[in-house]
Amino acid sequence: MRRREWVGVFVLISTVPFVAGMGHSAEAKPAWQIEWEKTLEAARKEGKVVKIFVNWLLSREGQEAYGEAMKASTRRVDVDTHWLVDHGVRAAKDFLTLEEYHRVRNHLEDKYTKVRVPAAKFAEEILK
């Protein structure tokens, strides 16, 4: 399968949460939704297909295809992301040393529990 076909498959699979939540109304389901639900049920039965897709998505080739399609960086260091600068994205792995990254990062649990939670409590206290 070519890269664009894999990206198309990824886009289809990524819409599952949105489609799955639509079937709760009392209205009749549109034909496309009925067909989509049949496709999802067949995919559930074919669990190996999902495993193959996820393995490909996490591979170097898959990360390159996903990055190109979504204009997003990857954490894989073997995937070139310098081209993202043209799209206004600077991948941390391309511009920061490991020490700089750990100094400025604020999205992991240790920063949340050591910085964000105490800051929120302090803000609540002074705003009372």
Image (cartoon, rainbow, N blue to C red):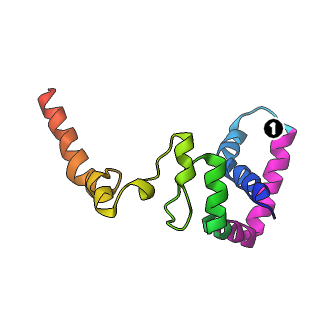
Estimate how packed mark 1 is, as few (under 14), some (14 to 19) or many (20 or more) residues with alpha carbons within 10 Å. few
Q: Which residue is rendered at x = 67% and y = 49% of the image?
A: 69
Find residue 47 and report its horizontal and vertical position in percent.
72, 70
Q: Nearer the viewer, residue 121 or 107?
A: 107
Tell me if 45 is positioned left or right of 118 in this view: right
**Residue 39 shown in magenta:** yes
The extreme left residue here reads 126
Find residue 25 and report its horizontal and vertical position in percent.
71, 34
Give the total of numbered labels.
1
Q: Which residue is rendered at x = 18% and y = 40% of the image?
A: 121
Say which quadrant the C terminus sits in.
Answer: top left
Say which quadrant the N terminus sits in.
Answer: bottom right
Q: Magenta stretch?
A: 31-54
Tell me if 115 is positioned left or right of 98 in this view: left
The rendered magenta stretch, by its main secondary structure, is classed as helix
The residue identified by callout 1 is 29
Find residue 22 and report its horizontal and vertical position in percent.
70, 39
Q: Which residue is rendered at x = 36% and y = 56% of the image?
A: 96
Tell me if 128 is positioned left or right of 30 in this view: left
What is the three-letter code of the residue carrying label 1? Lys
